[in-house]
Amino acid sequence: MFSRGKNLLLFGVALALVMVGCAKTPKPPRAEQPPPAEAVLPPATPIVEVKPEPAAKLPPPTQDEVRGAVARVYKNTVVVDTNRFAVGDFNGDGSQDVAVVVTPASGMLGEINSEVANWILEDPQKIVLPDPKKAAQPLAPVPSPTRVAQSDVLLVVLHGHGPSGWRNADSRQTYLLKNAVEGGIRSQQIATLLKANSGKPPLPRPRGDVISETLGAESGFLYYNGSKYVWYPRSQRTEPVASK
Amino acid sequence: MRILKISVLLIFAAALVLPFASTSTVEGQGATEAPRGFDNVFNGFGSQPQFDADKTTFEERDDIAKGLGPVYNAQSCAECHQNPVTGGISQITELRAGHFDGTNFIDQPGGSLNNDRATNAEIQERIPGGNEVRTFRTSLNVLGDGFVESIDSNTLVAISNGQPSGMRGQFIQVPVLEANGANRGGRFGWKNQQASLLSFASDAYLNEQGITNRFNLTENTSLGRFVGFGSGFDPVPDNQPCASNPSVNCGEDGDEDINAFARFMRATKAPPRGPGAEDGSNGAPNPDIVAGSNLFNQIGCNICHVRSITTLPAGSVINGGAFTVPAALGNKIIHPLSDFLLHNIGTGDGIVQNGGQSTRNKLRTAPLWGMRTRDRIMHDGEGLNRNESILRHDGEANGVINNYINLSTTQKNQLILFLNSL
């Protein structure tokens, strides 16, 4: 017969053997697999760029359509001057845009000037572009934020989306421009502008059509440079432009 | 007998511990978060002393005797990649120009990059008339780019395939210079014009600093005018032997600095999150940032600004066979907030680089990691506040931006707070 001590000892040994047996055997360091070389992809399918078509031949805008388009984004913050608007492809993306004269609605300045407004508020006369004739030059200081006052007359430019342009319910990208309108506005096609300027001092190259008008007794036009609307008085002629 | 008892106890204890010890090995096989930090500490690739030495090279100001110029943009990498630590972003832009003939973009003479500086006033580049397409490009963050390099090209294709048809990003393949021009999915630069960090370093050393190197042996011109060695403007010949292999021509880069640049970028940590981040990585989550993070996904920003990508496993061979993903970069989860694909969101700069004419008005989705360190955003730096920059998105992003426009003022502020925590 075994003594009690020996029994305990045998039990302990048996238990230890069971535990060791149940333990996961540590895997040996994983043998490095052949590196999964990155699959060679087929050459990217050439993508034919869809050239922006001239703004589609759309029916002339009605006052109600213009009012409705502005309200789509601005709601009741501005009052539309339904007698002063113009259409054209101002940002050059192939969709028809609309420019409309508006005034601030009473009591809406807080919303119009909000930091998180649904429009990009700017003053085209504050935009100073680098002089292309100078290699090194200090950049113009960043203009102070534009603020709208109750007495301001403003210009809304609503960029179109898709074939129906600014009439499209998804057309919501819009600039609200201060110091950008006094009298009437007129859309001028980029091709017409360049043709009319043939042989004359050069013009800047807008992205699309321009908004011709007179500001401060000087004729000129507003054009989109890819990020902002810039006022270009015709007396300021600086750089050559390529024929289209 | 006493010894026997002690032995049994030891075996018993070992048996108890063994199952738990083997478990951690299993867990270690999964993807893990990539290290993040603006702390000048390496990410595990190489060593800290190597990282420090490479960082010094990245910061080194080159001079004419070293090969600087004759036309160039900066004297060191860190002049443009610096904020808040070396490898970050900066306010510095480069200038590109050319002409659009109605069908194709054509570089200005000598290439679209218009170098802002020259070692001699006579050869200063100024945009010639007739090159009406012009753009500024802000300098990019390179922190964490080793992880970006380690993303499988097929992952980028899969991301594109998963995007809605009107928002599908364009994947382009570009030559890897160190692999004899083998193609790989582009991911670096505003136009995805580079696929590997060594190619990127080589390209930048030539184009930004004017220093030829073993993958780019021809000096830049000044608007098409030869200004290299022999012209009287460049005293350094482009035939220095490489330090590591004198039989190879290293151009003006005999020290092979491009290797140090690439090693430095590969060893940087990813940009860390700011205080209150929703992932809890920097203090207790701020409820408004959490809400903004959710809104970011709900309105669809994350379709292109992809939040998480896992890199290839360690040991994977990439860059046309020229680089093997090391353990420090492999199987890491990163949060770049980009799909590294090209999109047209209406802000395109009209410039074509490696991707062909179809990419003229497309730009790489800006990775938003580290965004809180930027005050000038978008490719041209024209975005001076977050709201306006969001509103500048149109085209492929039209639907997402319309969702943004429909948010309340509180929600917009939460979303912007989230962006400012990146």
Image: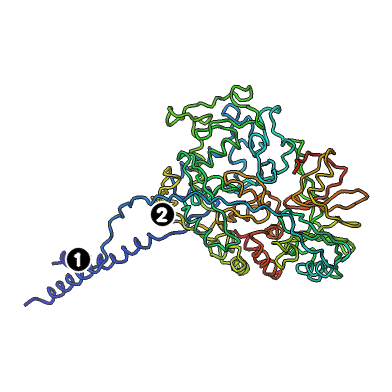
Q: Earlier in the sequence, mark 2 or mark 1?
A: 1
Instruction: Say which residue label 2 marks.
Output: B313
> Tag 2, which secondary structure?
loop
For residue B86, side relative to residue A164 (left or right): left
Q: Residue at x 68, y 51 (%)?
A: B376
Q: Nearer the viewer, residue B276 or B352?
A: B352
What amino acid is at disc 2? Pro
What amino acid is at disc 1? Ile
Q: Is residue A108 above or below residue B118?
A: below
Mark 1 crowdedness (10 Å alpha carbons): few <14, some 14-19, many ≥20? few
Which chain's residue wears label 1?
B
Q: Position of residue A181 (x, y in %)?
A: 87, 56
Q: Residue at x 70, y 60 (%)?
A: B391
Q: CA distance from mark 2 to mark 1?
A: 45 Å
Q: Residue at x 68, y 40 (%)?
A: B98
Q: In the rendered view of the protein, which quadrant contains the C terminus of chain B?
A: bottom right
Mark 2 crowdedness (10 Å alpha carbons): few <14, some 14-19, many ≥20? many
For residue B389, side relative to residue B166 (left or right): right
Q: In the rendered view of the protein, which quadrant contains the N terminus of chain B?
A: bottom left
Instruction: Say which residue label 1 marks.
Output: B6
Q: Position of residue A78 (x, y in %)?
A: 83, 67
- Number of the label disc, if any, that sits on residue A192: none
